[in-house]
Amino acid sequence: MSHRNGALSAARRRGDLEALAAGEAVDVLVVGGGITGAGVALDAASRGLSVALLERRDLAHGTSRYSSKLVHGGLRYLAQGDVALAWESARERAILMGTTAPHLVRPLPILMPLTASVSRRAASTVAAGMRVGDTMRALARTSRTQLPRPRRAGAEEAWRFVPGLRRDDLRGALIGWDGQLEDDARLVVAVARTAAAHGARIVTYAAVTEVGRGEVAARDELTGEALVVRPRHVVNATGVWASGLAPGVKLRPSRGSHVLVPAERLGDPRGGLTVPVPGERNRYVFALPRPDGLVLVGLTDEPVDGEPVDEPQPEPAEEAFLLETISTVLQTPLTSDDVVGRFAGLRPLPAAEGASADLSRRHAIVEDPPTGMLTVVGGKLTTYRRMAQDVVDRIAARDGVGAGPAVTHRLALVGARGRQPAAGAPPRLERRYGGEAPDVVALADGRDEPLAPGVPASAAELRFAVERELALTVEDLLDRRTRLGLVPEWRAAAEPAAREALQAGVRAAT
Ligand SMILES: Cc1cc2nc3c(=O)[nH]c(=O)nc-3n(C[C@H](O)[C@H](O)[C@H](O)COP(=O)(O)OP(=O)(O)OC[C@H]3O[C@@H](n4cnc5c(N)ncnc54)[C@H](O)[C@@H]3O)c2cc1C
């Protein structure tokens, strides 16, 4: 296949679907277009296998767009004594920041304010953990320029980072550095397009309905037509929906909720906050400034019963908990009136104590004996590449599979710029599109005009999403290719432009 930049469009989707429906054999069929499925598709395709990925809705429609958007070095795992997992995170962070997606990950300072409620002993334990994390950073070869050494700052410096911090009892802050993703959904799209550049057929709005040995039934969700795909190996990467295709995998999802507040409510911070939850050990609420002028406040952990829903919503009690906890360190407390957007995601947790592995933090690969399908669940956005490599290693070890060695640790994703930043592109587009920013600018005759005042996206981005990033619906454009849908006011302002971009795409194709 000749699409070197991995451009995905409605026309390419149609061609891919027709080839599969016509009975083309594929080595690996991946079910699910979140970060895990996209990662498996890329790993397999870049090792020379023929690959198709079927996603029942859009790329990043599931949990992968509702994360906290951190590429983290696993400090929390260190606190829990899981050094191996922390090391895996630190290593994958180094690969993402250094090679695969440097355009999408930036360093973020995160402060733990030292107020009267944080004892000196607790502060020195956290500081010691940060030092171990820094050693892992060095061993993983992330440079000090990318992630500076953690340190203690005085109160004045802490206020310079976060002017909204309360002033009465602040004696300073511990500052650590981690990676922050520009946008989790953009990472998924970049991985999927890179897989497409290696020949993978990426088909959205195609639901898998049944998996048999060597035969998988699916449905085109746009036309309702049924089709049968003939893969040699199947990978189930459907996250919290995994047991729908693999009944032996029992999950009990947990909801993690976030709210968005205007950055000015915390004094336009240059760094994030991590704040201990009063009365609990080792539990924190964070506030992370984002380049779109908002601060993300998270995170809750609420068990959810029954079938996982597609668009989970935060409960009012979760919102109140997040606002109250973060307000313990702020000069002016946040209230629900400050909240401009909210979202929740579901973690795939094992249904019962003592299940095969702690799926919340580690990934697990489970084989379904009758069909040979491999289900992969758990893990993190940060570790998607390693998960994918482990799955494809399992396939490569089977008889008759001619897969080459894994190469994704040195494979730049679509848009990862080389040593030179793209000349002349606006910084916002540089951050989101990396080396492809000039292509977006070219669609806008050199301008980067917002769709409406204060709405952080342009008509050129919508057009680019239709032409190259497989946006097929208004929701794809507003909720995944841009993230305007997170703020209802932005969504309403951008909807007519999204409709127009889709119609222009249809006109151009006919
Ligand atoms: C609240 C929260 C915050 C998080 N924060 C972070 C963080 O800051 N950093 C980090 O590294 N990790 C974080 N994580 C973890 C990370 O988000 C997840 O591990 C990851 O997104 C899971 O991706 P996935 O591809 O396995 O699942 P999903 O993204 O859910 O993808 C599964 C896909 O399968 C599709 N699908 C389902 N059934 C079918 C079918 N029958 N046919 C075809 N397609 C189907 C779904 O539509 C979906 O798109 C967080 C998780 C949560 C819940």
Image (cartoon, rainbow, N blue to C red):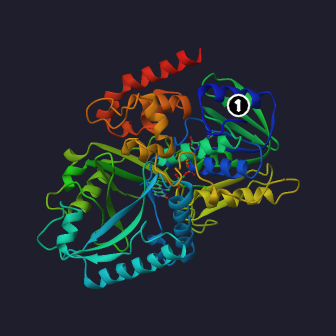
Q: In which quarter of the image is residue 396?
A: bottom right
- Residue type at tag 1: Asp
Image point 69% across, 58% down: which residue?
407
Residue denoted by label 1: 16
User: In the current view of this chain or complex, which residue is farthest to the left?
Assistant: 168
Q: Is residue 419 left or right of residue 145?
A: right
Position of the C terminus, as image quadrant, is top right
Does 485 appear above or below 128? above
Position of the N terminus, as image quadrant, is top right
Does 62 appear above or below 358? above
User: In the current view of this chain or complex, which residue is farthest to the right?
Assistant: 400
Looking at the picture, tell me which residue is in the foreground, 330 or 253: 330
Residue 247 visible? The answer is no
Image point 67% across, 26% down: which residue?
14
Image point 33% across, 51% down: which residue?
290
Q: Is residue 461 left or right of residue 390?
A: left
Q: In which quarter of the image is residue 494?
A: top left
Residue 358 visible? The answer is yes
Q: Where does the image place residue 366, in percent across and percent down from the top left? A: 70, 58
Looking at the picture, tell me which residue is in the foreground, 318 or 458: 458
Image point 43% across, 37% down: which residue?
479
Q: Where does the image place residue 27, in percent across and percent down from the top left? A: 79, 45
Secondary structure under the numbered disc 1 in the rendered image: helix
Q: Where does the image place residue 446, in percent across and percent down from the top left? A: 39, 32
